[in-house]
Image (cartoon, rainbow, N blue to C red):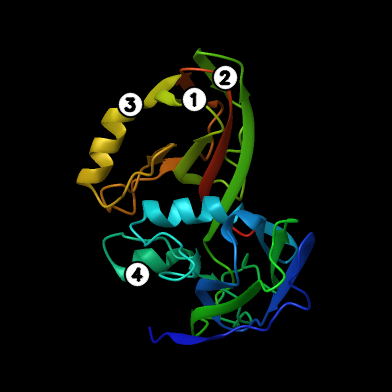
Amino acid sequence: MERIEGSMPDAQTVSASNTSVFKLPIGLKYHELQMVLGGTGTLLADIDEIRVLANEVVIHRYSATERDVLNQFDGKAAWHLTNNPILSIPFDRYGLENSLVNELTALDTGALVEGVAPANARQVRALVIEVDINAGWPADGTIKLFASQSASEGKGAGTVLHVNKTPRTIGGAGEVEFSDLPYGDVRSQALSRVTIGMSANSLTRLKVDRDTITIFDRTDAVNRSVQVDGVRVPVSGYFMIDRTERGYSQNLINLQGVRDFRYVLTADGAATATFISEYVGSLGR
């Protein structure tokens, strides 16, 4: 489908210790946003959180640094003030076997078309990007947004990529379980991948149990080796579980009807573990 490339409306303010709000036009299908950061200083580290809201529902949540890590894992160039000042915010999935499956999660903001939209279709009536800027942001700092879009299909939001951020505490070295992350609701029908960042120390092994059956068990070394042989680029300091690591779109972790879903982490010391979970589901409300 033909892409439409263009600039987005500016936020009213982009300044230190404030939240910049970008209200995006609706009517087309969004594949990706390009956030261009300009100025002096670190910039990326000065953005504490980016939130994407559709109909006032947060569908993406991460810091600028975390978004950059996710992009690097997909094989994209790391953000750099002079060499690559663009931070990609994708709605499509990336690096899969063909463009149709990549674009399955593109966010369609067009009006519902009678006879085309399913009976339960939800229309995106508002799309907003919120950017929390901390005190380190420079006086000459700027944020500009551009978008890659295509024509709406009139079917509503359809399948949506939800990116959820959840911190958890690891008390010390050894094994710890977490079973309270979202799963199985309308927004988390399947898990595409999860990225776990550690504030200190590291993860040496990770298991995933679904209804008491272990469906994933790898050491950090094995995990990185498999991903390098596939279509991903592991990032130092992060443990990624990616069921599409070989480029096959259907290799998701099904979470519908699941009664118990838990991560079993083996760490070599105390830390805050931040889970960035990428779910495939519906818009919700």
Using the image as rendered, state which of residue 138 and residue 127 is in the foreground. Answer: 138
Label 2 vs 1, first from the N-terminus: 1
Q: Are marks 1 and 3 in contact (CB under 8 Å)?
A: no
Disc 1 marks a residue whose amino acid type is: Asn
Label 4 vs 1, first from the N-terminus: 4
Mark 4, residue position = 100
Whether residue 12 sits left or right of residue 179 in the image: it is: right
Q: Are marks 2 and 1 in contact (CB under 8 Å)?
A: yes
Q: Secondary structure at mark 2?
A: loop
Mark nearer the viewer, 2 or 3: 2
**Residue 201 got which mark?**
1
Using the image as rendered, state which of residue 91 and residue 222 is in the foreground. Answer: 222
Mark 2 surroundings within 10 Å by alpha-carbon count, few (fewer than 14), some (14 through 19), many (20 or more): some
Disc 4 marks a residue whose amino acid type is: Leu
Q: Residue at x 53, y 79 (%)?
A: 147
Say which quarter of the image contains residue 117.
Answer: bottom right
Label 1 vs 3, first from the N-terminus: 1
Say which quarter of the image contains residue 284.
Answer: bottom right
Q: Residue at x 79, y 62 (%)?
A: 18
Residues at marks 4 and 2, CA–CA distance in whole angstroms = 43 Å
Mark 1 surroundings within 10 Å by alpha-carbon count, few (fewer than 14), some (14 through 19), many (20 or more): some
The answer to whether residue 171 is seen in the rendering is yes
Mark 3, residue position = 218
Residues at marks 2 and 3, CA–CA distance in whole angstroms = 20 Å
Mark 2, residue position = 270
Q: Secondary structure at mark 1?
A: loop
Disc 2 marks a residue whose amino acid type is: Ala
- Residue 236: horizontal and vertical position, in percent? 39, 40
Q: Secondary structure at mark 4?
A: helix
